[in-house]
Amino acid sequence: MERFENLLEEKLVPNRILRKGEVVRGRIVKIDDRTAYIDVGYKVEAIMPREELPPQTKEGDEIKGILVKFSGGVPVLSFQRYLKERLYGFLKSAQEKGKFVEGRVEEILDDAYVVNISGLKAILPKSEARQGLRKNSRVVAKIKELSDTKEGLKIVLSEKDFIELIKKRKKERILKQLKVGDVIEGRVIKIDPEKGVTLLIKNALRAFLPKEELSWGRDKNPYNYTEVGERLKVKVKRIPKDGEFIFVSLRELKPNPWEKAKEVISKGKVMSGKVVDITEKGVIVELFEGLEGFVPKDEVSYDGSMPKKWENVNVKVLEFNPRAQKLILSIKETLPKPWEEYIKNHPVGSKVKGIVQRFEKASAIIDLGDVKGIIHRSDLSWGRPKRVEEVLTIGEEREFVVLGLEGKFVKLGLKQLQENPWELFLKKYKVGDRVKLKVVSVHPFGAFLEFPEGVEGLLPVSEMDNAKDIKVGDEVEVRIIDIVPHSKVTLSAKEETKVEDIVSEGGESGFTLGELLKKKMKL
């Protein structure tokens, strides 16, 4: 059969001999739905399947092809085989040497692009391509796979190396223009809560934002400042020689908080803040980002309670030294004083219960719950003051009367629980009255005698005729010779001296009557 076709070929084209495998050049004279007809100087026109034609080929164009066979004496050409044989060596060499080849996108599939490389169709998976490719987009890629199959050459491309090359050149251009202190913008591509944030600058250069450079404040959680995909402005801190990463800062875009503090903080000012740490010695409060003050333990509260971490609190500035970056605060100073609140709820005259906590000299400290009370010896009884230990016992609960405030203490009284005996005494007695009273105590300077109303009077030794014979429990008839209201009563056990005797005793010395009385009574 082959011999017959060859004989037919020689008979039809006596002036030219065509052989299989030969490269034939011709001009396209007609293209229909299935076939292209090509004038190759042969008696009959050669044919070529339309699907083998290069893109945008039209009638009148010249084309080459390899003669693959004769069909009924008509030469059949293949452009793809021509390309394969002409380009295969070149493509194989490019693959082996890792060189780039160029082509253009001819068709877009679901997961790949069809790329035309000098007429050969290659596949570029979308996973290996840069974004934004469209029809006729230029493609520069490396050959990832090249094989000769029955269906023709199988060519798979990858743009990844070309993308990296573009990035590298772009990164070099960026680094050449960049300097420390520049403010740049990048896209957040990674967040590591333990280390910091990675940004991509102009899709080429990576920048690292350490978590220490996020803020002047204590909050170093990157998620509180940005999120993946967000664009972030930062300041260039350091540019390493290798240029792989640059180091940037977010906090340096904001003013130093201690400089701001000079404008807004002064001693005695009350401000709001947030508790950021609690230690054994006290509490650390952040007034605004980066500015922290210390609250000593004894300035936290009146009752020893502590705030919770991240709780909002009011503070009063006790000490402020921006040069030394020292800020001492008080939470307690902004709180209502518990003793003042206690007095509001238990006004003067109120009866309250408390537990005797301890003795301090001539006073006792009383536990009233949230506050402390104090009772002095003079408020234990209406009579002659006794020692505190004689009236009160540590640990016992007693009822007291609120008398007011004494510093941070609520001033208390016991004698105020009873009617003031002096009021009864002053209504009933006067100087000169004679009464019979019981001796309650004896001292070198005299004896104390008690009135039925509870008031004690002093019987001095000088007003006794038989001082050695007086003892506790005796009843002695006495006369009131002096009354200092609410304070003192002086008694006499001697016989009453008449005024005229006192006058005659004074002679003409010029003494007044009062002076003579005092002299006579030896007061």
Image (cartoon, rainbow, N blue to C red):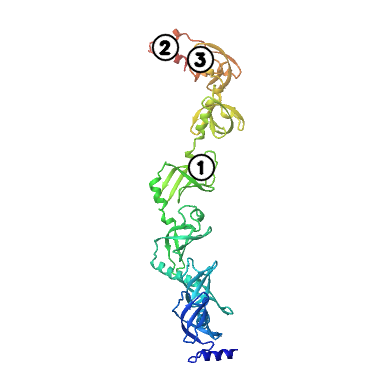
Residue 332, compared with residue 444, is above or below; it is below
The mark closer to the camera, 2 or 1, is: 1
Identify the residue position indicated by label 1 in the image: 300
Q: Secondary structure at mark 3?
A: helix
Label 3 amino acid?
Answer: Leu
How far across and down, in percent of the image, does residue 153 sit? 55, 78
How far across and down, in percent of the image, does residue 277 sit? 52, 49
Label 2 amino acid?
Answer: Leu
Marks 1/3: CA–CA distance:
52 Å
Residue at image position (48%, 54%) is 225
Q: Secondary structure at mark 1?
A: loop
Residue at image position (54%, 31%) is 373
Q: Closer to the N terminus: mark 3 or mark 2? A: 3
Q: Quadrant of the N terminus?
A: bottom right
Identify the residue position indicated by label 2 in the image: 513
Q: Is residue 427 visible?
A: yes
75, 406: nearer the viewer: 75
Residue 438, picture quadrant: top right
Residue 4, picture quadrant: bottom right
